[in-house]
Amino acid sequence: MVVAETVALVGVGLAAVLIVALLAVQRPPVTGLTVLAIAPWAVVAGLFDTLSVTGAYPATLAPVLRLPAGLLLAFVVAGLVWVPLLQLATLRDYGPGSGRYLAAAGLGMAVVLLVTLLVRQELDGAGLLWLSATPMLAAMLAALAYVLLGFVDPTTLATTRWVGYLVVFGFALLGTATAVGIDVYGQVGTSVTAALVSVARDLPTASTSVGWPAAVFGVLVGCLVATLVARAIRSDAVAGNALAIVVTGVTVGPAVTTLLVLVLR
């Protein structure tokens, strides 16, 4: 079993290296649209992890599907889709940097995985409510914080635009899922969200609430990271957008897993 799991991990690692090599040959533009197109694939990574937790896949594949390895697997699948789609976009006279095909493929895969998960697992009315409300609450928190950030640091908004909002939203979703887990389900969540909870417990508001201060703290961290991404983009657009892709993956993926595991309990 250990040998099979190791082989699976090594295989995904080699596949990731191959995808990077193929993309390096094609040299697609890595723009803000690329970052937005990758966002659904971060959701796919979270769904991989959740389906693995529910036993949808053989135990041998669990190390590959569970986070953080699931992020690498999602990157491999996205790369396998992206490489031929770059050629298709050229044939259809779409700019290779538009990312519309990549986004559509990721969204389609996320929908299929989510439907599969909901068919396999029962979801009660409360679970459906929080599954729908949590992303909307996170989106509103992120929008409010991002607008306020624009008054403090308008350069960040001018540089990153929707990319910066996506970065803030990733942290807001992680924080909001944490708040819902604590205040609604009485669960801390994953080790990633436990870090937010640990900080919130040290705040003066801990006697009143821990979950929502953790969400606010997550949004503040997201704003700080967005400013760092903006600086990176101004220095090197490709490197800055690549950083935004990584940040989106490590926040949205775990947030999706945290929320789904909570509502499916």
Image: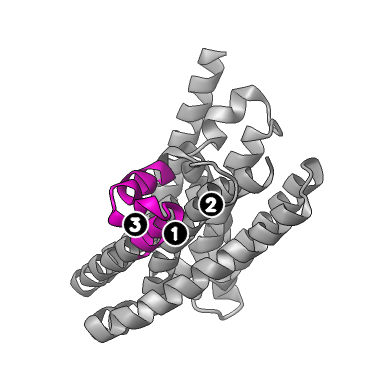
Prevailing secondary structure of the magenta residues: helix
> Which disc number belongs to residue 183?
2
Residue 196 vertical placement versus 130 (above, below): above
Q: Amino acid at mark 2?
A: Asp
Residue 24 x, y percent position in the rendering: 37, 55
Left or right of 204: which side holds 111? right
* Circles 2 and 1: CB atoms closer than 8 Å: yes
Question: Percent from the top left, x then y, of residue 260?
Answer: 62, 48
Q: In the image, what residue occupies the spot 43% across and 71% down?
A: 142
**Any part of residue 45 in sight:** no
The CA span between labels 2 and 1 is 8 Å
Residue 228 versus residue 120 in the image, above or below: below
Label 3 sits on a secondary structure element that is helix
Residue 103 in sight from this viewpoint = yes
Residue 32 or residue 202, whichever sits in front: 202
Q: CA distance from mark 1 to mark 3?
A: 10 Å
Q: Which span is picked out in magenta? A: 193-219
Q: CA distance from mark 3 to mark 2?
A: 14 Å
Q: Are marks 3 and 2 in contact (CB under 8 Å)?
A: no
Residue 181 coordinates in the image, percent (x, y): 54, 48
The relative height of residue 242 versus residue 57 in the rendered view (above or below) is below
Q: Is residue 92 magenta?
A: no
Closer to the chain start, of discs 2 and 1, is 2
Going by the numbered disc 3, the residue's amino acid type is: Thr
> Which residue position is annotated with label 1?
212
